[in-house]
Image (cartoon, rainbow, N blue to C red):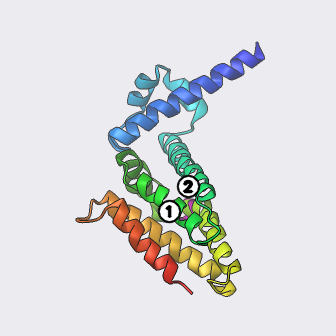
Amino acid sequence: MVKRTSEQAEETRRAILDAARHLFETQGYPRTSIANIVEAAGISKGALFHHFASKDALFFEIWKEMQLEMDAQARAAAQAGRSKTDPYAAFLAGTRVYFNWASRPGFQRVVLIDGPAVMGLDGWQENDDRLGRSNVEQGVRYLAHKGLIAEDGIVPISIMLLNALNGGGFALSRRESGLTPDNLFDAFEALLRGLR
């Protein structure tokens, strides 16, 4: 009985996350109400607040979930992209995944548009740094190990590259004229390969 109750609680939590994610992706945070989420999930308001303290807490969980999904795909692409002849290949394979995600309307809306508005720019940057900088730093460390980047440049270069990636993502979300995931990737590749 306890196991079933635990399974039901997890099913309810997942239903809330799925319903809220769809609404946040398609309508945006400001136009999505708790009532909308409850109705879409087919649950009571009390059930929602049993799992999430507030709409902001629910939004943050979805923001983080989307970031982690993108991160898992980027890591898998980097692993698959490893090359014996090109030390930059794995880093760039992960980068391509990021720019492709950053061109998706749902990711743009939740992570890049509503994320900073809901979490505040400082909160957004702090959480993004916590989730993303270790990956970038790992790639930069590998390049330093190969003698392509100075050891004392690992941390500052990682910070700069993470912010270059984010800047590209924000530009895609603003639909800046002439920008595509492909030409941003090309620009990032030129930047990365030019580092010393």
For this view, does 152 lie left or right of residue 181? right
The one nearer the camera, 160 or 194, is 194
Q: Residue furthest front?
A: 85
Give the vertical position of 39 relative to 97 (above or below). Answer: above
Q: Which residue is mark 2?
A: 74
- How far across and down, in percent of the image, does residue 145 sit? 71, 78
For this view, does 78 lie left or right of residue 171? right
Q: Which residue is mark 1?
A: 95
Q: What kind of residue is marked 2?
A: Ala
Which label sits on residue 152? none
Q: How packed is label 2: few (under 14 Cα within 10 Å), some, or many (20 or more)?
A: many
Residues under numbered marks 1 and 2 in contact, where contact means CB atoms less than 8 Å apart: yes
Q: Secondary structure at mark 2?
A: helix
The one nearer the camera, 77 or 179, is 77
For residue 10, which quarter of the picture? top right
- How far across and down, in percent of the image, does residue 112 sit? 41, 56
How would you classify the magenta stretch by its main secondary structure? helix
Give the vertical position of 84 relative to 49 (above or below). Answer: below
The one nearer the camera, 133 or 182, is 182
Residue at x 46%, y 78% (from the top left corner) = 191
Query: What is the span of residues highlighted in magenta in the rendered image?
Result: 122-127
Q: Secondary structure at mark 1?
A: helix
Q: What kind of residue is marked 1?
A: Thr
Residue at x 58%, y 29% (from the top left corner) = 13
Q: Earlier in the sequence, mark 1 or mark 2?
A: 2
- How far across and down, in percent of the image, does residue 41 sit? 46, 24
Give the alpha-carbon distance from disc 1 to disc 2, as whole Å: 7 Å
Q: How packed is label 1: few (under 14 Cα within 10 Å), some, or many (20 or more)?
A: many
